């Protein structure tokens, strides 16, 4: 880092490169590869914490946790299928992206589980933030800034994360054939119930293309599916499933999907496999739209009608994954403008997760910030990396 600063050489920070196709095209050809930093420094299952180097493969760490019947409760989103990436990336990439899965309505996001980190700033200085126990930490909680920063603030070298026990049982309640607005009401009823729903999602009929891995056992082409998940002690899950079924009966017949098929279905929703690069929509840009859940059904239907696109509603966090057909005969920023106008009107925001290099060079991949927030972000960046050595251009077309 100090050599790069001295030579004013910007660096692209990568682990396995699984998310290199997300964000603006970085303004450098010099790479700082963190994959050799791949050790598990400490794992204390009894204390529910793990300390790993930032380049540790995510799949290896999750296998280690699984061997102790534990997990990252926020369900890390693995975008290998969506982006045609070679693997599922590293722990550092997971934190840098900050994407969490359907359980975030109950467990929170990545930043809520990041307890501490060792990192190197854009000044070339090593620093430590947080620790193994939150109550023993004083000063600024810089971990929250590193999560979701896309490698633009500091180079993480080692991180400490909170882990949780895997639930003893899992069941999913499924309703077929609802339109997005009716599904919105059903999911709102489930999430607003006292039955501790840990995830809710809706996959329209148009988005189910044949043998979609994980969804094939619960859905079929031409038939929308609405899903709500219950987790916990087996007896509790059975009891709550019965009560939630009664709550959902006004919306249609309720089916019960348990254990392995349920887990596979939620894995497919979490990783957006319906829009996989190898599938029929593999060439379509994919947007990640966050909006208030109460308005999401109408937003998704409007976008589908105006663009001919397809949606997946991951409703535990007010999230829509939208695959929109490329606009060959229109301005490249026209679709981005439309998506963001719709999101802005509801107080939401939209990010382009998958798009060609040409498209990413012509539009803002990340949702433009209001002036006040942009000024605050600039001050934070200046505090960590004033020369823009780290991932220069990743967040902005202006290369800053």
Image (spheres, rainbow, N blue to C red):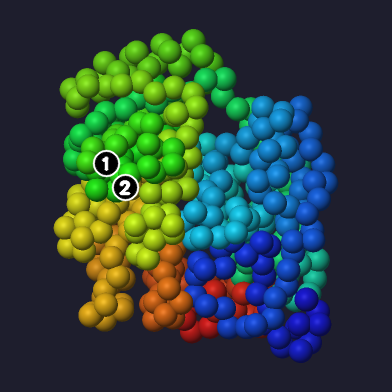
| Residue with the mark numbered 1 | 221
Q: Nearer the viewer, residue 157 or 76?
A: 76
Residue located farthest toward the bottom when viewing the structure as drawn:
7
Residue found 57% across the figure and 36% down from its top: 73
Question: SS class of the residue under badge 1?
Answer: loop
Quadrant in the picture for the C terminus: bottom right
Residue 365 on image: x %, y %: 43, 71
Residue found 57% across the figure and 78% down from its top: 26
| Residue with the mark numbered 2 | 209
Residue 33 on image: x %, y %: 73, 68
Question: SS class of the residue under badge 2?
Answer: loop
Q: Nearer the viewer, residue 275 or 378?
A: 275
Earlier-in-chain disc, 1 versus 2: 2
Mark 1 vs 2: CB contact within 8 A: yes
Q: Is residue 224 left or right of residue 122?
A: left
- Label 2 crowd (10 A; few <14 / some 14-19 / many >=20): some
Residue 117 on image: x %, y %: 73, 54
Q: Which mark is residue 243?
A: none
Is residue 263 visible from the viewing direction of this image?
A: yes
Mark-to-mark CA distance, 1 and 2: 6 Å
Q: Give the quadrant of residue 363.
A: bottom left
Is residue 295 visible from the viewing direction of this image?
A: no
Q: Is residue 83 left or right of residue 310?
A: right
From what the image shows, is residue 252 above or below residue 288? above
From what the image shows, is residue 60 above or below residue 8? above
From what the image shows, is residue 334 above or below residue 204? below
Residue 181 on image: x %, y %: 19, 41
Q: Is residue 297 left or right of residue 317?
A: left
Residue found 43% across the figure and 64% down from its top: 354
Quadrant in the picture for the N terminus: bottom right
Q: Nearer the viewer, residue 342 or 378?
A: 342
Residue found 33% across the figure and 14% down from its top: 243
């Amino acid at each position: 880092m100090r050599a790069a600063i001295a030579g004013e050489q910007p660096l692209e920070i990568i682990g396995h490169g699984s998310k290199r196709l997300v964000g603006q095209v970085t303004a450098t050809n010099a790479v700082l590869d963190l994959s050799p930093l791949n050790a598990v420094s400490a794992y204390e299952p009894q204390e529910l914490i793990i300390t790993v180097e930032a380049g540790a493969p995510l799949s290896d760490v999750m296998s280690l946790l699984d061997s102790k019947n534990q997990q990252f409760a926020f369900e890390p989103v693995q975008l290998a299928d969506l982006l045609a990436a070679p693997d599922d990336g590293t722990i550092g990439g997971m934190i840098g992206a900050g994407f969490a899965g359907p359980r975030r309505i109950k467990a929170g996001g990545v930043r809520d589980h990041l307890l501490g980190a060792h990192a190197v700033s854009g000044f070339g200085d090593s620093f430590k933030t947080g620790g193994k126990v939150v109550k023993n930490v004083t000063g600024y909680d810089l971990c929250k800034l590193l999560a979701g920063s896309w490698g633009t603030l500091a180079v993480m070298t080692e991180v400490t994360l909170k882990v949780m026990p895997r639930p003893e049982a899992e069941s999913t309640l499924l309703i077929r054939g609802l339109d997005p607005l009716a599904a919105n009401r059903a999911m709102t009823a489930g999430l607003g119930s006292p039955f501790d729903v840990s995830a809710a999602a809706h996959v329209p009929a148009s988005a189910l293309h044949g043998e979609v891995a994980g969804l094939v056992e619960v859905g079929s082409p031409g038939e929308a599916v609405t899903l709500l998940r219950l987790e916990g002690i087996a007896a509790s899950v059975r009891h709550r499933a019965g009560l939630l079924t009664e709550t959902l009966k006004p919306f249609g017949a309720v089916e019960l999907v348990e254990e392995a098929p349920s887990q596979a279905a939620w894995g497919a929703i979490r990783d957006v496999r319906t829009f996989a690069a190898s599938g029929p929509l593999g060439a379509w840009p994919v947007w990640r739209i966050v909006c208030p859940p109460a308005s999401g059904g109408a937003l998704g239907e409007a976008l589908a009608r105006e663009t001919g696109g397809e949606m997946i509603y991951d409703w535990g966090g007010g999230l829509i994954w939208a695959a929109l057909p490329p606009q060959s005969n229109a301005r490249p920023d026209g679709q981005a403008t439309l998506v963001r106008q719709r999101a802005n009107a509801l107080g939401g925001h939209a990010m382009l997760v998958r798009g060609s290099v040409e498209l990413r060079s012509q539009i803002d991949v990340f949702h433009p910030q209001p002036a006040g927030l942009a000024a605050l972000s600039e001050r934070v960046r200046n505090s960590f990396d004033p020369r823009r050595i780290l991932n220069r251009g990743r967040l902005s077309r202006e290369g800053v």
